[in-house]
Amino acid sequence: MLNTIIHGEPTDKPPLLIAHGLYGSARNWGVIARRLSDERQVVAVDMRNHANSMWTHDHGYSDLANDLAEVIDQFGGQADVVGHSMGGKASMTLALLHSAKLRKLVVADIAPVAYSHSQIQFIEAMRAVDLSRVERRSDAEQQLADNGVEKALQSFFTQSLDINGQRWLLNLDTLASEMPKIMGFPEIDASWGGQTLFLSGGESDYVLPEHRSVIRGMFPSARFAKIPGAGHWLHAEKPREFEAAVRTFLNA
């Protein structure tokens, strides 16, 4: 099963499952998870091929959705789910394939569509880091900077660096080979009528007006909201606003 970080104790409310995005980890969500755990148990997962979860050759969304379903079964069989980016696509697939396992769904800054851009350049930048010359995170960040990675992403990527082991806690080979699947979205002849919030960054272009008809075809109860001044990493850029929006939606 996926590695989990658990915050808080079970309550009379469903647990909240958090699925991170590409190159992320459960640890990235620590602050928000701890704050939301004042009302419900929060379970943050490391997705497969990330951090402390299993490495596999497959990284399609049905695989990721099945991983999440297995975790939910361990925590009572039904949960509220928050998924960001890749984790959002996995969470949407979960809702379409395992509809009874979700009560409410928050999809953070992603749509159920194929994107034309790739994230492969970041794998190449991480592969280019000479880990034998890394004694502290700042050493790796400098090498990433030399490879054109912006400052905010340098510190984000190095959270997945095992300095003592001189290795990335990311299965870069599988993530590279499966990148077309990660950028895409599976064809699933299903819809999920549960309450769904598509929460986007006001400065992001990942969820566009032209995506809404596709979204409503799969998630007819979808609602949309934006966090002003936030980009794609809305939970990191505006954590208080993100937490407040999620809390309000879950408790409505």
Image (spheres, grey):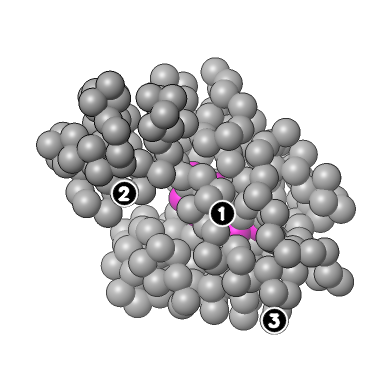
**Proximity of marks 2 and 3: CB atoms separated by less than 8 Å:** no
User: Element under label 3?
Assistant: loop
Q: From mark 1 to mark 2, how far is it between C-alphas? A: 21 Å
Q: Name the residue: 20% across, 49% down.
A: 150
- Amino acid under label 3? Ala
Could you tell me how many numbered marks the image carries?
3
Q: Position of residue 172 (x, y in %)?
A: 41, 25
Which residue carries the number 3 mark? 252
Query: What residue would you read off at disc 1?
Result: 83
- Residue that label 2 marks: 155
51 relative position to 208: left or right: right
> In whole angstroms, how far apart are the C-alphas of marks 3 and 1?
19 Å
Judge whether 163 appears above or below 239 on screen.
above
Of the two numbered discs 2 and 3 in the rendering, the one whose residue sits closer to the viewer: 2
Work out whether residue 111 or residue 44 is closer to the camera in this orientation and state it: 44
When the figure is inspected, residue 243 is found, relative to residue 213, above or below; the finding is: below
Q: Quadrant of the N terminus?
A: top right
Verify CB contact (< 8 Å) between mark 1 and mark 2: no
Q: Position of residue 105 (x, y in %)?
A: 65, 61
Local packing at callout 1 (Cα closer than 10 Å; few below 14, some 14-19, many 20+) is: many
Stretch in magenta: 81-88
- Three-letter residue code for mark 2: Ser
146 falls in the magenta region: no
Who's the residue at 61% across and 33% down the image?
53
Q: Determine whether, in the image, residue 183 is placed left or right of residue 105.
A: left
Q: Residues within 10 Å of mark 3 (few under 14, many from 20)?
A: few
Q: Secondary structure at mark 1?
A: strand
Three-letter residue code for mark 1: Gly
